[in-house]
Image: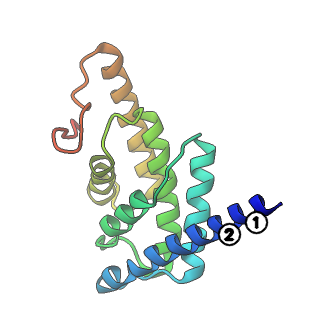
Amino acid sequence: MQLSRLFHSMSASIQEQEMNELLEMNETTKTYGLTLAPADVKSMLEARNRALSGYGRVELGIEAAKELIELFSSSSLIRQEEYAETLNELQEVYYWLKNETEDRIGDRKLLSLMKEMFEDECEGALELLRSRLEEFAERFRRELQAGESVFEGGDDDWTPGI
């Protein structure tokens, strides 16, 4: 019985720390007119956990969520009214893409690819972004199967061949 209380206490402490870390991101994002309320952060963490569970993934920290916020908050295509919902959708797309590329592309490169497509090709349209990323993932898998992948490697040596 005590062990279950201990785990619950540790889990609550971790969730509180993650919420605080994401709320602290508001200091940076407010320069772009974007902030997350505590309820938005809670929703984001819940969406993250659903995506991780749905894709059979385990992630020990929230670094990817923080990088996603940092990278996408500078977009002129995201308005405050849709900010939290957009982040939740981008997070789901990110974890889907991690699976589709078999974790062979570093987080920063993958997020940069998403941002570039979001801004340039998709002009902020999330459904179009998902469609373009599906095409990218299919090309990636074909090249991987052919043994010709230029996508493998860390964050420093990969460039999108789009």
The percent position of residue 158, horizontal first and vertical second, equals 19, 38
* Residue furthest to the top: 146
Q: Is residue 44 left or right of residue 31?
A: right
The percent position of residue 148, horizontal first and vertical second, equals 24, 18
Q: Secondary structure at mark 2?
A: helix
Q: Looking at the picture, does residue 88 appear above or below residue 73? A: above
The residue indicated by pointer 1 is: 5
Q: Residue at x 28, y 15 (%)?
A: 147
Q: Is residue 92 left or right of residue 26?
A: right
**What type is the residue that disc 2 sits on?**
Ser
Q: Are marks 2 and 1 in contact (CB under 8 Å)?
A: yes
Q: Is residue 2 left or right of residue 85?
A: right
The percent position of residue 104, horizontal first and vertical second, equals 34, 34
The C terminus is located in which quarter?
top left
The N terminus is located in which quarter?
bottom right
Q: Residue at x 51, y 59 (%)?
A: 89
Give the class, few, some or many, for how many residues have Cα within 10 Å of label 2's Cα (few <14, many ≥20). Answer: few
The one nearer the camera, 33 or 76, is: 33
The residue indicated by pointer 2 is: 9
Name the mark on residue 79: none
Q: Quadrant of residue 56?
A: top right
Q: Looking at the picture, does residue 94 appear above or below residue 141? A: below
The percent position of residue 103, horizontal first and vertical second, equals 39, 36
Give the class, few, some or many, for how many residues have Cα within 10 Å of label 1's Cα (few <14, many ≥20). Answer: few
The one nearer the camera, 80 or 100, is: 100
Q: Residue at x 40, y 29 (%)?
A: 138
**What type is the residue that disc 1 sits on?**
Arg
Q: Looking at the picture, does residue 85 appear above or below residue 97? A: below
